[in-house]
Image: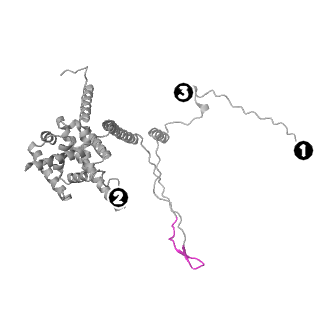
């Protein structure tokens, strides 16, 4: 084995690292809006959603080199962001409950939603089981079709179809219960 | 029959899309990029710090081991003479403490005299060279291997330097001038 004087090991490693960083930059630019919207669909607060998406990218970057299949970056990022957003939502709710018991007004009490109808829809989304909720949100926020959602979630298209169907049915039920006159 | 339901589905989807399709602030991507790079630098610094602290700990261990080895070698090289005192110190018998009746009827104990420790030999630690020289001197004296002579009696042919040119020190008397003692006259 010949020793390449022009390209020693240190330089090769540096080049690999630079390539990895460039790829991460590219993926960040492609997916930043997606990550934000996923976080926003859970939290409905812009600042919180941005914080969570940022945290998701930091986590993703930490383990990016270990991700063998870079095509699955979106799936991976969606899952990280979704988990972090749910964690933040739970933390916010706990904070609200704590502040309510102390009789203080909370800034996280209810996210500002302009119309009654919108509030009902978002509450219906929150009432869905997690898998149905994520599938419905992904189909809604980016206008993805069933094939794209299946690719993002790494599940068969049939699964996405059935989840979307179930999600819509359950939403209708929830909305009907919330407002029987409609 | 499917017409109104599918219409409702699409309406629902549209409403949901309108509610959730929110764009991040314009600086969001830059902010994320900045925080990622900050974390990257922090991680690199942390790893360097870790390597440095491990190296420092290893160096400290090596220094500690070498110091303790050196101390042990010093202990081996420096023998010591333990001079045991042959005399046993005879102390007067100390009477046991007895309560003493005070004039006011109370009882007091007289403090016992301090008892010196008996039987512990004095330990003298000296360098090996000094100890050897001392032993040599003692054995020479015991075997009378040398003769005590006066400096003046040393013959010249022995080669010993006897006449060291040291300038004699002359003490000159200080002349004291008479004190002006006009007051006494």
Q: Is residue A104 left or right of residue A8?
A: right
In the image, B172 versus A120, the foreground residue is A120
Region of the chain picked out in magenta, as a range: B92-108
Q: Which residue is mark 2?
A: A99
Callout 3: residue from which chain?
B
- Cα–Cα gap, marks 2 and 1: 103 Å
Circle 1 residue: B183
Q: Residue at x 32, y 45 (%)?
A: A47
Q: Picture quarter containing residue A105?
A: bottom left
Protein chain holding label 2: A
Magenta span: chief secondary structure: loop
Nearer the observer: mark 2 or 1; the answer is: 2
Q: Give the distance between the C-alpha atoms of the residues marked 2 and 3, in whole angstroms.
A: 107 Å
Determine if marks 2 and 3 fall on one subunit: no
Choose between B94 and B13: the one closer to the eye: B13
Mark 3 neighbour class, 10 Å CA radius: few under 14, some 14 to 19, many 20 or more: few
Magenta-drawn stretch contains B38 = no
Callout 3 touching callout 1 (CB < 8 Å): no
Element on which disc 3 rests: helix
Q: Which mark is residue B158?
A: 3
Q: Report which quarter residue B26 is drawn in.
A: top left
Position of residue A10 relative to residue B119, above or below, is: above
Of helix, strand and loop, which one carries label 1? Answer: helix
Query: Is the C terminus of chain B in the top left, top right, bottom left or bottom right quadrant?
Result: top right
For the view shown, which residue lies furthest in the right direction? B185
């Amino acid at each position: 084995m010949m020793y390449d004087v022009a390209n020693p090991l240190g330089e090769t490693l540096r080049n690999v690292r630079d390539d990895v960083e460039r790829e991460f930059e590219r993926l960040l630019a492609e997916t930043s809006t997606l990550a934000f919207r996923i976080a926003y669909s859970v939290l409905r607060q812009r600042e919180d959603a941005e914080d969570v998406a940022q945290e998701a990218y930091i986590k993703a970057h930490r383990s990016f080199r270990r991700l063998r299949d870079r095509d699955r970056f979106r799936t991976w990022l969606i899952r990280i962001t979704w988990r972090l957003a749910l964690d933040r939502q739970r933390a916010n709710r706990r904070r609200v409950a704590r502040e309510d018991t102390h009789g203080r007004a909370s800034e996280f009490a209810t996210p500002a939603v302009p119309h009654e109808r919108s509030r009902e829809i978002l509450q219906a989304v929150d009432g869905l089981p997690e898998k149905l909720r994520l599938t419905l949100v992904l189909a809604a926020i980016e206008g993805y079709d069933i094939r794209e959602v299946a690719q993002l979630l790494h599940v068969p298209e049939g699964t996405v179809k059935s989840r979307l169907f179930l999600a819509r049915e359950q939403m209708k039920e929830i909305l009907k219960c919330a407002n029987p006159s409609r | 029959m499917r017409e109104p339901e599918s219409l409702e589905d699409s309406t629902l989807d549209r409403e949901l899309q309108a509610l959730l399709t929110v764009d991040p602030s314009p600086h969001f991507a830059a902010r994320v990029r900045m925080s990622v790079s900050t974390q990257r630098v922090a991680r690199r610094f942390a790893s360097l710090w870790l390597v440095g602290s491990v190296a420092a700990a290893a160096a400290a261990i090596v220094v500690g081991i070498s110091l303790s080895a050196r101390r042990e070698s010093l202990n081996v090289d420096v023998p010591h003479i333990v001079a045991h005192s042959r005399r046993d110190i005879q102390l007067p018998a100390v009477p046991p403490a007895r309560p003493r009746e005070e004039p006011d009827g109370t009882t007091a104990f007289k403090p016992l005299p301090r008892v010196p420790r008996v039987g512990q030999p004095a330990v003298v630690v000296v360098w090996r060279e000094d100890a050897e020289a001392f032993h040599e001197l003692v054995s020479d004296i015991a075997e009378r291997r040398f003769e005590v002579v006066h400096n003046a009696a040393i013959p010249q042919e022995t080669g010993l330097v006897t006449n060291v040119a040291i300038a004699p020190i002359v003490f000159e008397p200080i002349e004291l001038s008479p004190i002006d003692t006009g007051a006494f006259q």
